[in-house]
Image: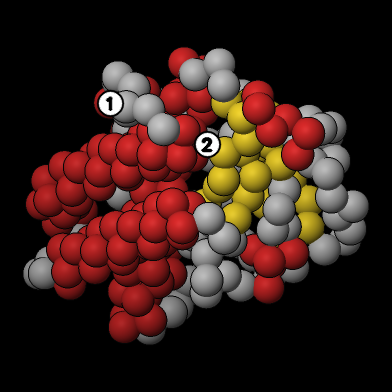
């Protein structure tokens, strides 16, 4: 793996981990998980998430600059943070959902501790996804400004699950969003006009994928997501 690609994947992983830990701490600090507690949680988590997304965008922009031997390009934060990453859904709505998870679980008869853990999982997985979405969107925004970039090749992180390894090496046109999944840690390498022989741009993304194992579906909020056995995308 190219060392610059590895460095970017590692930096993004650290950012996701720190962000998840901060969101988890904010969740655990709540006195209860009633409607009255929602504003206090949002007051901490929404600014935190926007800052993490800006950091992810900065890391990605810098990675592309190093990979291509140029300076980072100007980047409008509004295009790569907040509601721009979730088809207009505001962060306030995204981070109210963990409370809904608790309330629904309790209504269904789940024990309190289990319901709270379910809400925590939803909050932290949403945080990890939001950082990944910022990285993914920055790739396309920067690529639109750089004529050298023709596409990207998916690169799994060192601890990638079997699912991520299955789709390792997928290639995407510069205007296509890389499909993601819950807690995805994949990064990319850059395909340029100078090495376009590595990139065909066909719909199969240069891989013969078995649709019974993995397929791409369009999520109304997240855009393209990878769907396979044992992966749940309905609660992101």
Q: Which mark is residue 77?
A: 1
Query: At x 65% / y 24%, what residue is drawn?
Result: 193
Q: Is residue 137 visible?
A: no
Between 51 and 87, the one lying in front of the other is 51
The residue under label 2 is: 221
Q: Position of residue 180 (x, y in %)?
A: 58, 49
Image location of residue 38, percent across then percent down: 19, 51
Q: Earlier in the sequence, mark 1 or mark 2?
A: 1
| Image side of residue 123 versus residue 187, left or right | left
Q: Secondary structure at mark 1?
A: helix
What residue sits 57% from the left and 70% below the top?
Answer: 160
Which image quarter: residue 13?
bottom left
User: At which x and y percent is residue 35?
Assistant: 20, 53
- CB within 8 Å, label 1 to label 2: no
Tell me the quarter of the picture where residue 175 sits: top right
Q: Quadrant of the N terminus?
A: bottom right
The residue located at (12%, 66%) in the rendering is 30
Say left or right for 31 vs 193. Answer: left
Residue drawn at the location 32% of the way across and 27% of the way down: 71
Q: How many residues crowd mark 1 within 10 Å: few (<14), some (14–19), many (20+)?
A: some
Q: Nearer the viewer, residue 220 or 66?
A: 66
SS type, badge 2: loop
110 shown above or below 205? below
Tag in front: 1 or 2? 1
């Amino acid at each position: 793996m190219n060392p610059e690609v590895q460095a970017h994947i590692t930096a993004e992983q650290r950012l996701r981990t720190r962000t998840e830990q901060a969101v988890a701490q904010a969740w655990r600090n709540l006195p209860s998980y009633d409607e009255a507690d929602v504003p206090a949680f949002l007051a901490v988590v929404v600014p935190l998430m926007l800052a993490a997304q800006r950091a992810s965008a900065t890391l990605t922009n810098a990675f592309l600059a190093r990979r291509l031997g140029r300076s980072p390009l100007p980047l409008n934060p509004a295009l790569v943070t907040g509601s721009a990453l979730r088809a207009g859904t505001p962060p306030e709505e995204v981070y109210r959902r963990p409370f809904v998870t608790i309330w629904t679980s309790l209504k269904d008869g789940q024990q309190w501790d289990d319901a709270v853990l379910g809400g925590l999982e939803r909050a932290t997985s949403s945080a990890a996804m939001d950082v990944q979405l910022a990285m993914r969107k920055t790739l396309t925004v920067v690529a639109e400004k750089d004529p050298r970039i023709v596409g990207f090749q998916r690169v799994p992180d060192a601890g990638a699950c079997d699912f991520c390894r299955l789709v390792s090496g997928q290639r995407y046109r510069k205007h296509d969003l890389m499909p993601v999944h819950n807690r995805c840690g994949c990064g990319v390498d850059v395909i340029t006009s100078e090495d376009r022989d590595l990139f065909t741009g066909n719909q199969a993304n240069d891989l013969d994928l078995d649709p019974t194992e993995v397929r791409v579906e369009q999520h109304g909020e997240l855009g393209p997501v990878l769907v396979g056995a044992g992966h749940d995308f309905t609660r992101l």
